[in-house]
Image (cartoon, rainbow, N blue to C red):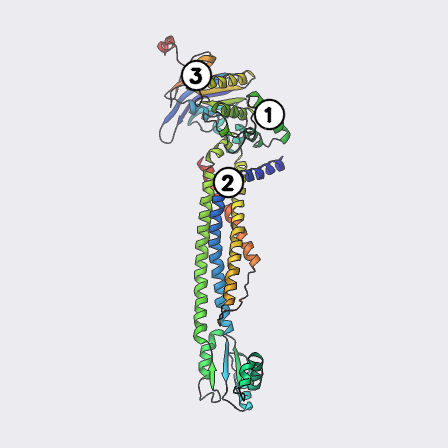
Amino acid sequence: MIDLKGVGVTYSNGWRALSNVQLKIDKGEFVFVVGTTGAGKSTLLKLLSREETATEGTVKVSGQDLSSLPLHDLPAFRRKIGIVFQDFGLLPNKTVYENVAFALQVTGASRQTIRRQVPYVLDLVAMSHRPDAFPNQLSGGEQQRVAIARALVNEPFLLLADEPTGNLDPETSLGIIQLLNHINLRGTTVIIATHDQAVVDFLQRRVIAFEQGGLVRDEVVGNYRATEAQEETA
Amino acid sequence: MIFGSLTFLIGEAGRNIRRNGLMSLAALGTVTIALTVLGGTLWTTFRMSEFARSQPEKFNRIDVFLPPKAERSKAQDLLEKLQNKPEVKEVTLVTREEAWKMMEESQPVLTSALDENPLMDKLEVELKEASQVSQFAQSLRDKGEYPNIDKVLDAGEEVRNLINLSRVIRVIGGGLAVGLFIATLFIIHNTIRLTVFARKKEILIMQMVGATPWFIRLPLLLEGLFHGLMGGVIAGGLMLFAGHLVSQFVTSVHSPLSGEVPSLLSPATVFDIIAVTGAFLGILGSHLAIRRFLRQL
């Protein structure tokens, strides 16, 4: 479903964020992308959401080459993926219900669809009890649950989360990761860029590690850190 | 679906204005002040120009007095002579009897105190061009040419000054109009840009959830329209109110120049022009701000 071939990203200031990345992710996978700050994790996610474009190689998502995706097709592409931000990215002047509904409204969804889908995803993320609250009235964990609900409401085939637990305490972080795991078990491909060793080690899923823009480790079932044997091999 | 989206976007603009109350109020206040200054200056300039232009029309008349108790035939001869001058539009003879009768009606106390009619026959000479008043009046003062004229009254210097003033006002007003229009557009553009900038993150999120550029743009354009139109309506109201007060003051002042000068533009038209200008500047300002902003993201 996701296929990167010889992908490199060099910014206009000369910074090389990614180089020669070869990567395949199948439908329904759950993948942690790990690495230090500046290793290239966020750039990978930005490539997949077409916030950035590759300066070398090809990035294909669902068979669509994102480098050649026309700008007017970008909104339609984005509606098929869900994005979760570290800082939650909720619209501050909208209630929980309105924030989630907004992702449907931009697609021109009918009122009936909105009335059906929004309560459903709010229930899924255990936030159906506070539909009228504004983001500043919620805890960090609750805000992230609402952000996940918004990302899910269009039933995306791919969910991208950039440091979704970065602003949360360990206990809340585990709750969010379990929620994302639950979503993955329902069939959505989930890719998470994270620094959070605890959640990666807890879930024991595929781990892709980046260092200085290069993909240095890809384990089907892995931990945040490489084992000594792997380090010696590397 | 399109109607549903449009209803949502209009509602969205309304919600944004309401929920960003303080920012909206600041934007509305700035737009109102900018439009009041623009409209007020242009309206004042326009009215001054109209006033200055109307004044010479009042002074295209020369009053020519014959000597006391001059024979009526001399007045008739002079009338015919002046009537044939190319500069003259019309000459009217006001006999001393007619003048006395008018005076009796307007100032009965004064006329009752007088034993006899001291007035002179008068020719009211109306010229085709107000600018010729001074020169023509001077020619009438030539005793060789016009021995039967006792006195000539005109407002030559005042007319020349008013004509010059009218020209100056037109030139300055034109320059001010262009300059102030650009300045107002800049102020409104900047004000709306601030409201757009305050929502930079919001716009980024909209893009990430798949909102089309028009979906992002339309509520912001409607907000710009609202701020511009409301600012224009309030500015128009303020101007009409101020205009009414000034008009009341001017008519209360007794001066040869006072008196109602009819305007080409009715108060309702002035109000409409300011409101429409506000709406136009609001939409244009927000369009420019959003276009520049969406390009940066």
Q: Is residue A219 visible?
A: no
Question: Residue tagged by mark 3?
Answer: A208
Q: For numbered disc 3, what is the local secondary structure?
A: strand
Name the residue located 47 percent from the left edge and 39 percent from the top edge. Answer: B196
Question: Which residue in the structure is indicated by mark 1?
Answer: A119
Q: Residue furthest top?
A: A229
Q: Residue at x 56, y 79 (%)?
A: B106
> Which is nearer the eye, B295 or B195?
B195
Near mark 3 (Cα within 10 A), the count class, few <14, some 14-19 or many ≥20, is many
Q: Quadrant of residue B263?
A: bottom right
Circles 2 and 3 on the same chain: no
Image: B49 above or below A166: below
Residue B101 vertical placement versus A27 (above, below): below
Dot 1 or dot 3, earlier in sequence: 1
What percent of the width, then of the height, locates residue B142? 44, 86
Q: Is residue A20 left or right of residue A70?
A: left
Q: Residue furthest right?
A: A112
Residue type (three-letter) at the residue carrying disc 2: Gly
Classify 10 Å Cα crowding around label 2: few (below 14), some (14-19), many (20 and above).
few
Q: Which mark is residue A51?
A: none
Q: Chain of mark 2?
A: B
Q: Name the residue tied to disc 2.
A: B21
